[in-house]
Image: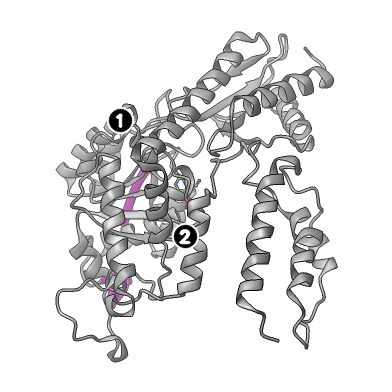
Amino acid sequence: MNPDWEELLQLATQWVAKYRSQVGSLPVLAQVQPGWLTAQLPAAPPAEGEPPEAWFADLDRLILPAVTHWNHPGFLGYFGITGSPPGVAADLVSSALNVNGMLWKTCPALTELEQVVLSWYAQALGLPGSWFGMITDTASTSTLLALGAARERALPGTRDRGLQGAPRLRLYCSQEAHSSVDKAAMVLGLGRDNVVRVPADAQFRMQPELLAAAVHRDRQEGYLPFAVVATVGTTSSTSVDPVPEIAEVCRENRLWLHVDAAYAGSAAVAPEFRWALAGCELADSFVANPHKWLFTPIDCSCLFTAQPEAFRQAYSLVPTYLTTDVAGAVDLMDYSFQLGRRFRALKLWFVFRAYGTKGLAEIIRKHVALAQEFAGWLEASKDFELLAPVPFSVVNFRWHPQGLDDEKALAEANQRLLHAVNASGRVFLSHTTLKGRFALHLAVGNMETDRKTVEKAWWEITNAAQTLGFS
Ligand SMILES: Cc1ncc(COP(=O)(O)O)c(C=O)c1O
């Protein structure tokens, strides 16, 4: 059967509207066990088409119970995200257009809107509007692409010859950098052992003098240092590496500088957070994810570079069937290993047009203020302690009842506390470790998270602490 377009879209929009209006009353964390959904679903596809009402009924019956609701205002784990209405609408349009922007001519609008929206995004953050950019699915992909370009610049011809017999490349990042840096090294054939994790200071920031020393030592030992990844907004503590000093080490040693600002980059849409991007204009490449903290539905990662030619040299490969006779156009496939390309620029475009840079800055400000207020409650409490500064919208803390000082016992107590809070279904927090200490991680990032939500989280946490004992 071929479903009727209008009827189907009506069902879909009604379903989405109902889901979004009720999501706050659903348990944040999926309450099912592994395998639950698989056991409910037929092992084989239906031989005959089924009516749409049946599929939509199964969304409610089978899918929603197995969803952890990132749209829930009480989702306070990892980095909170928002599928904002303009972003969701644009995703629908993108699916309906169903274009593939591998070449300019396969969808001029995709290629050109992507360039324009990336320039808007860079300007909104106070970064060079002249950078070349492309939108990828994730920061992991963006970082991999950037480091692939850096590898080719360091060892021209690696794309053809491979790394056999080549000097051993070394890559540097802080000990707080995201695991996507290691994964890029794995994929690029560098090996994880050649990712040098530079120690961070007491505020979780890379120490540039230790970076310089590591580069110097490696050179003497016969390695070929080629790139540094600095992080603006590390995954655990949201610390900001000193990019200007790191850029200087890169300049002196002719190293590619990639900045990973996946989460915190978007904060700079509010001018008072521009300090976080100081020195980033010196980077060879830079990534920030509007799907993390710019209210754009996943996936949307913005990769910028001051060295587009290095990307072309690393990735351009044109089989006959993809040659074109269009002069003066950018073909995005030349800058990436990916060929097919979804029209992701639409959702960032709609987001900018719906809220404007002022509206976006207001939401960022609200999130940071909520995190600061929560941190204030922790500091005023004798049973909790902050484990890291709070420069943005993330608070790392732990329950530290008086008289309980053994690290292992504290970690266990906090794990039990986290479990109890998350089992409530009303809020969801995640965890990490900071300088070896188990930390509870509360991140404000959803547009709909408000003061009431954060108060509720504080109540759940203190109530669970009381129930578990010690305090
Ligand atoms: C600093 C940082 N970089 C990169 C990533 C990876 O992001 P993605 O899921 O877009 O690959 C994360 C994920 O949280 C992150 O915090």
Horizontal and vertical percent for residue 139?
43, 53
Q: Residue drawn 72% across and 45% down?
A: 22
Closest to the observer: 210 or 55?
Answer: 55
The kind of secondary structure element at disc 2 is helix
Where residue 58 sits, quadrant-wise, is bottom right
Query: Start and end of the magenta stretch?
Result: 158-173
135 vs 264: above or below: below
The disc label shown at residue 271, or none:
1
Closest to the observer: 311 or 452?
Answer: 452
Which of discs 1 and 2 lies nearer the camera? The answer is 2
Three-letter code, disc 1: Pro
Q: Residue drawn 48% across and 45% down?
A: 295
257 vs 456: above or below: below
- Tally of numbered tags: 2
Horizontally, residue 409 falls left or right of residue 329, namely right
Horizontally, residue 430 falls left or right of residue 279, namely right
Q: Which residue is mark 2?
A: 90
The disc label shown at residue 52, or none:
none
Q: Residue drawn 67% across and 16% down?
A: 400
